[in-house]
Image (cartoon, rainbow, N blue to C red):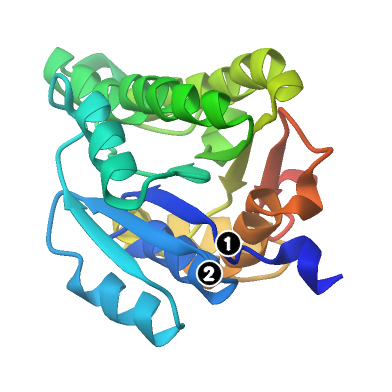
Amino acid sequence: MNSLFSLNGKTALVTGASRGLGQGIAVGLAEFGAAVIGVGTRDLTDTKKKVEAAGGTFYEVITDLSNDGAAAQLAADAVGKTGQVDILVNNAGIIRRSEAENFSDEDWFNVIDVNQHAVFQLTREIGRHMLENGSGKIINIASMLSYQGGLKVPAYTASKHAVAGLTKSFANEWSSRGVYVNAIAPGYMATDNTAPIREDEDRNAYITSRIPQGRWGTPEDLKGAAVFLASDASNYVNGHILNVDGGWMSS
């Protein structure tokens, strides 16, 4: 059974790995044997320390995925560093908050470029490499807002609906060729992105009361789902969106 979840000899590329959910996933994959290429727009020293403490090998790439050509360059750099990428985790994302009637075009395109366009591009570029090798696992990070509308986050909601659709679309084309594409939809997680909500006492209380487990999630809560979808244990799981939400969607 342990061999089903082993990631020994595998290399994982994780975007948005400097902190939060991406850091938690990177460490979780390392704990099960994967080497990790961590991608971020800022210093990843903290993630490197945690991955190495878990016994893993860490490679750092600093890039801004919203820039033209960044995804293609990242794919080439990642393969150049390690020779092969076996696991891709599209975690990088941003959020902008404003009432819908005041939401600016600039904020719209900033969010769509990172959360949707870069996911498509990097999946395509790394996917080509995986298809040449005849195997690979791709994990997109979706959201509860892949299902729901949210408040004051129209671009984020649109992008996360798109992530769910892209997951299914790529999965349909690639599963017969050995590349499996799935997504994790985190529930309400205690990260930098959700700090404004948690600081709103009324909204925080409402959200917490609706989560059957009675608490917000943490990056640690995503480790198991990520390892499952990255490993041989999920070899007949494809095009699936796995909710890790403390029961939010059932309440």
Closer-to-camera residue (128/250): 128
Mark 1, residue position: 222
Q: Is residue 175 left or right of residue 59?
A: right
Residue 151 visible (yes or no): yes
Vertical side of 171 occupied by 85: above or below: below
Q: Earlier in the sequence, mark 2 or mark 1?
A: 2
Residue drawn at point x = 18 percent, y = 73 percent? 45
Q: Quick one: quadrant of the N terminus?
A: bottom right
Local secondary structure at mark 1: helix
Q: Please tell me which residue lies in front, 112 or 77.
A: 77
Mark 1, Cα crowd under 10 Å, few <14 / some 14-19 / many 20+, is many
Of the pair 74 and 110, the residue shown nearer to us: 74
Q: Secondary structure at mark 2?
A: helix
Q: Residue at x 49, y 70 (%)?
A: 30
Which of the numbered marks, if any, corresponds to residue 28?
2
Q: Quadrant of residue 47?
A: bottom left
Q: Are marks 2 and 1 in contact (CB under 8 Å)?
A: yes
Give the total of numbered labels.
2
- Left or right of 69? Residue 91 is right
Residue 233 on image: x %, y %: 79, 54
The answer for how far apart the CA atoms under marks 2 and 1 are is: 8 Å
